[in-house]
Each structure stands twice: as C-alpha cells, then as structure tokens.
Amino acid sequence: MKNTRTLLLSVFVALAACAPTVANRGNIIDSDTLTQIKPGTTTREEVATKLGTPTSVSTFDEKVWYYVGRQTEQYSFLTPEVLKQQAIEIDFDDKGIVTAAKNLDLSRAADAEPVDRSTPTFGQKNTLLRELLGDLSHPMPSMKNQRGSGT
C-alpha cells in the first residue's frame, strides 16, 4: 500500500514537471474588440474604456498609443516559445478622435541585445569583505542623546 502511494506520488510529480508555463505579458486584443475602434468617431476615452490603458504612449507624440502583448509557453528550463504576439498603434487627432488603428508588422521586429559596456564611476571599489565589515569602523551612536531617554 505504501509503495503504491509513493509510486502514484512520483508519477504525479513527474507529470506536473512536464506541464508548460504559459506567460502573458502586455495586452493582446482580440479582433472583435479592435473592430469597435472606428476612425473618425471613437474618442480617446472610449479607446481607454474598450482596450484599457495603453502599453506605451509615443515618446515624441502623445497622440499615438501602442498596445503590445506577447504570450509564451515554456517547458522547464528550455527557451520560451512565442505563441502569440501583437502590436497595435492607435493614432488620435488634436481633438482626441481616432484617426487610425492598425496592427504593426512584427515580422520586421528584432530582439534588442544589451550592450556589454559600463559607465565608469569615480570613488572606491568595495570588496566583499569591505562591504561586510565596512560599517564596523564607524562608531555606534550614543544612546544618551536619543529622545525618550529621560535626561
């Protein structure tokens, strides 16, 4: 009986380890919701109500909103696989009315690689030992001068 429980528990743990982790980042908008955004009639407030707050607002033009989303699936420690990804641009005129709503072409997208440079800084470089023991060289504050001591 005990061996059967152990075997069942082992099988359950093994099966659970094989289940993928699905991660949703950003906002993936379904096509039905996107068709509700009508250029020339839909306002900025209506867009925010139907689609939520934008993922990003253009740096150079506040009248351009972006909705970006990605869904990935990952097994254990393997590289995540992209299931869905989407980028939508919503343009507004000066009155806050939608002028265009378009899906952006993600086939031209490229991964951004971090640069392996660092900005030089001045000052001292602390070692691990100095970090751990550095505060011991400073005197402890006196307990006499603290409030509530009665003196």
Image (cartoon, rainbow, N blue to C red):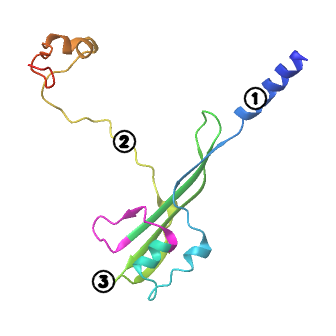
Judge whether residue 52 is colored magenta: yes
What is the distance, in whole Å, between disc 2 and disc 3 at their CAs?
37 Å
**Quarter of the image containing the N terminus?**
top right
Q: Residue at x 67, y 41 (%)?
A: 20
Q: Is residue 87 above or below residue 49?
A: above
Q: In this view, does 86 lie above or below 21?
A: below
**Quarter of the image containing the C terminus?**
top left
Of circles 2 and 1, the one toward us is 1
Q: Position of residue 13 (x, y in %)?
A: 74, 28
Q: How crowded is mark 2: few (under 14 residues within 10 Å), some or many (20 or more)?
A: few
Kind of residue at badge 1: Ala
**Which mark is drawn over residue 14?**
1
Q: Do the residues bearing badges 2 and 3 touch, measured as CB atoms within 8 Å?
A: no
Residue span colored magenta: 50-64
The answer to which quarter of the image holds residue 113 is top left
Mark 3 lies on a secondary structure that is loop
Q: Position of residue 114 (x, y in %)?
A: 36, 42
Judge whether residue 112 is colored magenta: no
Mark 2 lies on a secondary structure that is loop
Q: Which residue is drawn at 63% across and 34% down?
A: 76
Q: Mark 3 points at which residue?
A: 94
Q: Mark 2 points at which residue?
A: 114
What is the distance, in whole Å, between disc 3 and disc 1 at their CAs?
58 Å
Q: Residues within 10 Å of mark 1 (few under 14, many from 20)?
A: few
